[in-house]
Image (tube, helix red, strand yellow):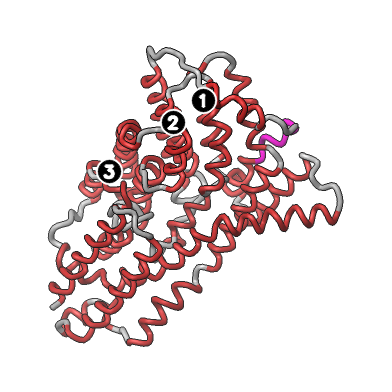
Amino acid sequence: MEVIIGIILLVSFVGMVIYAVKGGNMALGVIIMAILWTILAIAGHYISSADFVAENTAIGELTIMGTITAVFQDAFTNNGANTVLFFFGAFFGRILLETGIAPALIRKTVELGGDRPVITTILLNIVVAGIFTSMFGTGAVIAIGVIVLPILLSLGINKRVALTSFMLSIGAGLYMNVLPFKQYQIYYADGDSYLFNGAYLKFGITAMIVQALITIIYIIIAQSGKKRRVSAWAAPTSARSDSKNVPGIALLTPFLPVLMVVLFNIPICFAFLVSALFALIVCGKLTGFNETARLITKNFADGVIDTAPLLCFMMFIQSFNKAAGLCAPYFNAVLGGVIPKSALLICAMFAVLAPLGLFRGPLTLAGSGAAMLGILSGLGFSVVLLYPLFYAPTMTMNISCCITQSWIVWGLNYTKNDTKEYMGHSIPCGWIVCIILAIFTYIYFGSAAF
């Protein structure tokens, strides 16, 4: 019976992948899967063999009400700390826009690049990566994109190169952003032991550098020998973004939260708050008590609105993760003899199959990857190895390359890029990044696979 339940789970897993590929609402999809898998886990407790139940404590101690509470109550309420974290992160992002710091940083970079389009593009993408070490979300991407993309197009950069390099640079910066790290940390039962400024830091820095270098190489190769064709429509947008006068010291603000966390182990919410206040002070925005109160509450409220869809998905994915954990023994019963149990082979599998991180596939935690994570966790692989293995296709293939990502859809429409041509540029770059990061994952964490 446990094999039959495992097969039903696999069929439903394939159904979820198809649903995700077709662009279905993932929040609704994962909560439906949580309900279905919880029912199968409870049923398996009563119809599986006694030996199988005894060997697997995940299902051996189930009660109907206890399971419902764990999956549909505790999974929601245990996410409070991450909810607060995202509120503060979104608030900080809004402050960077309110003060004009992000646009000013971009303007200074363009001035530094001068009349050298490729050099200016490379510098802009490095700055974008730096900005997104602290900013996060569709609103932040659009706010920066309407400044950067017109500048690139006005420099004569090919529109596909402009959009691809911009999105890859965002992904590079997000490797060192605490917000997505915390978002995907909740997928792991012992994820709290995998610290941003501890076990993850070495991989995060490596991943950011690798993706940034691949982006630079891509820009140089893609623009090599191309004639400069200027898009005049972009010029007014970039001019308007230069209207705010920002002091030089304020340009350090986007990098302060990460530096405070990494160098001084300061709690991230406090780091966001201090950095936001620093920005407001140096930019002269604290003009009086009432105006300061209005400014802070308005930007905090706007940040909450920005994060609402993400938080809904995060709460539902918690339920799905809990249900997947209960079902892991059944997946193991079917796939335990098929999936490699070697760290080297698992890393090789993730390198070769990295494109399965596209279209919300089984290698991205932004889609149906939670089920695959449950399978590999059930086989005994450590979070130390699994976190970077899943994080690379999630950050690179899904967030930087996939057309199911909301901000990439916006970018395609904004720059009038063809979807297939964009994927033809972005996916090879993303695949190369994932291959390199799978190699580094094995080098860094292969000995701690179990």
- Say left or right for 445 vs 259: left
Q: Can see residue 321?
A: no
> Residue 154, relative to residue 405: is it above or below?
above
- Say left or right for 165 vs 302: left
Magenta stretch encompasses residue 404: no
Q: Residue furthest front?
A: 233
State the separation of the CA atoms marked 2 and 3.
Answer: 18 Å
Q: Nearer the viewer, residue 37 or 232?
A: 232
Q: Residue 379 sits in which quadrant?
A: bottom left
Q: Nearer the viewer, mark 2 or mark 1?
A: 1
**Residue 355: image tag:** 3
Q: Kindly identify which residue carries mark 1.
A: 152
Predominant SS along the magenta part? helix
Q: Nearer the viewer, residue 440 or 417?
A: 417
> Residue 368, relative to residue 233: is it above or below?
below
Residue 59: x and y, percent?
27, 79
What is the magenta range?
246-253
Residue 370: x and y, percent?
33, 60
Q: Nearer the viewer, residue 429 or 409?
A: 409
- Mark 1 Cα shell of 10 Å, populated few (<14), some (14-19), many (≥20): many
- Whether the residues at callouts 2 and 1 have beta carbons within 8 Å, the answer is yes
Q: Residue 267 sits in which quadrant?
A: bottom right
Q: Residue at x 49, y 56 (%)?
A: 182
